[in-house]
Image (cartoon, grey):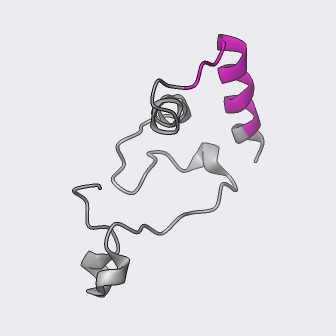
Amino acid sequence: MSPDPGRFLITGRLEDFNHFKMSSLWNIKDTAPYFHDNSAKTLEDVLTHYTFALAPGGILLTPRDSHDIIAWMKLL
């Protein structure tokens, strides 16, 4: 569980604890910094975070995979 209480700070509702409002990916290349706490400065930082957050040992991406994913996000 995250130490960040998320939307609970706004609503005061216990069911909102550890929940966050998600933004659209539309024009994501123009909306840095990323995450609710602005902790990712670039799309590369976002990809690195999720590479390790979604799998215990990390997801193995080649440099080409990473480049392609970032290029795709910039097209949105």
Q: Image quadrant of residue 16? A: bottom left
Residue 74 in percent (x, y) is at 71, 39
Of the 4 image quadrants, the one containing the N terminus is bottom left
Count the marks: 0
Q: Which residues are magenta?
A: 59-72
Outermost residue on the top side: it is: 63
Residue drawn where x is 68% and y is 52% of the image = 27
Residue 7 in percent (x, y) is at 35, 74
Nearer to me, 67 or 13: 13
Residue 30 vertical position relative to residue 50 in the rendered view, above or below? below
Residue 28 in percent (x, y) is at 62, 49
Q: Is residue 66 magenta?
A: yes
Residue drawn where x is 42% and y is 37% of the image = 41
Nearer to me, 12 or 76: 12
Q: Is residue 38 magenta?
A: no
Residue 45 in percent (x, y) is at 47, 31
Q: Image quadrant of residue 75? A: top right
Residue drawn where x is 46% and y is 47% of the image = 34
Q: Is residue 37 left or right of residue 26?
A: left
Outermost residue on the front side: it is: 56
Query: What type of secondary structure mainly makes up the magenta span?
Result: helix
Residue 25 vertical position relative to residue 39 in the rendered view, above or below? below
Q: Image quadrant of residue 47? A: top right
Residue 17 vertical position relative to residue 27 in the rendered view, above or below? below
